[in-house]
Amino acid sequence: NKGNYEHYMQKEIHEQPESLRTTMRGRLIRGGSSKAKTVLLGGLKDHIKSIRRSRRIVFIGCGTSYNAALAARPILEELSGVPVTMEIASDLLDRQGPIYREDTAVFVSQSGETADSLLALEYALENGALCVGITNTVGSAIARNTHCGVHINAGCEIGVASTKAYTSQIVVMAMLALAIGDDTISSRTRRDAIIDGLFDLPNKVREVLKLDQEMKDLAKLLIAEQSLLVFGRGYNYATALEGALKVKEVALMHSEGILAGEMKHGPLALVDENLPIIVIATRDTCFSKQQSVIQQLHARKGRLIVMCSKGYAASVCSGGSCRVIEVPQVEDCLQPVVNIVPLQLLAYHLTVLRGYNVDQPRNLAKSVTTL
Ligand code: UD1
Ligand code: F6R
């Protein structure tokens, strides 16, 4: 049921304030007499200690689910103190890459039925790793075959392009980081800020959804383009990859997410006055580096669209020389949840304006159950 919306993708983008709330329901605890703020993931409670003791956490997934894990990687590294590595399921299998008994392998999958991820799960089980699932589908193969896990509870996702599952996956993995991390005095302030940030995240997502018309206007400008680059780094490297994936899969426009730190190692050669480039430059520890990336793109007459924190337009783009998308600022590790929303909206509007099928893009299936 699409309700008042024309397409499922549109509905699922706009329902993110609610889906995020459901994802967190009963799992974030604040207040009480001790005023303690804690995270409770029922599905992991008997396994948290083993995860904390593991030698490595390996995230495994495909497509958008892989990108969600990539977005959560920095906060997991920071809070857990355990090394975190990333594997695209098919690539892990192609290489028969190393998975050890001392590893925790975390399988991220909206459907819980993706063939590559399932085969990688079999492989990790054979190798003796502790296997954890993060899925949206109760009773799915990943939920059944992992040792333990967390349901993201985002609600049924029908549009082939994953949107609300992506943001809920990131939130679950941020909660996972809080659950694994030691609750020490020194980490208290940071943890409290993240928990407060999680509580307020649905409101911030509601706020960023107000950019809908602005993104439609931007889509009108980009409608006939051949290609679109998206630059990001740090917490928002994943945002660049995921934004580009949305644009290519539904709007059928070539789009590439680029790690801004790699700009000078090749991509800079593409920059001219015609190719549109989105640069994600919201406030975090990478901000000054992104400012210098913007300057260098400017010097090559790049056609820039800069995503920045509210109130920072002048610091990213002097003299109105580029278009800006201003988004509300949240705790750095949660910023990817806010930043992806305008790009989801852009992909959606580009697709409708270009006249393509938004909910069922050509050649794609919602759940990829074949190899
Ligand atoms: C569970 C109930 C929820 C109830 C809540 C009350 C289910 C599906 N969930 O939620 O309805 O409101 O208790 O406390 O009945 N699991 C895996 N692999 C996965 C995902 C999950 O093994 O990929 C396992 C978990 O380890 C857990 C079970 O499935 O044993 C349910 O997981 P989850 O729904 O996340 O647990 P709760 O949030 O506690
Ligand atoms: C992109 C998309 C795909 C899936 C991928 C993994 O919007 O939907 O890239 O993310 O096929 O699917 P799941 O998460 O079901 O394992």
Image: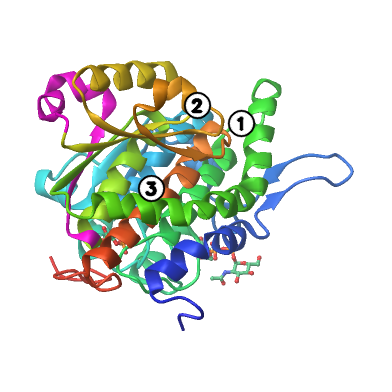
Going by the numbered disc 3, the residue's amino acid type is Ala
x and y, in percent, of residue 242 in the image: 31, 47
The residue under the point 42% across, 67% down is 10
Compared with residue 355, is residue 197 higher up or lower down, i.e. above or below? above
* Element carrying mark 3: helix
Lower position in the chain sequence, tag 3 or tag 1: 3
Lower position in the chain sequence, tag 2 or tag 3: 3
The residues tagged by marks 2 and 3 sit, at their Cα atoms, a distance apart of: 20 Å
Foreground residue, 133 or 172? 172
Q: Residue 283, labelled with which disc?
A: 2
Q: Is residue 309 left or right of residue 366?
A: right
Q: Which residue is identified by label 3?
A: 68
Foreground residue, 191 or 81? 191
Q: Is residue 135 magenta?
A: no
List the single residue furthest toward the front. 319
The residues tagged by marks 1 and 2 sit, at their Cα atoms, a distance apart of: 27 Å
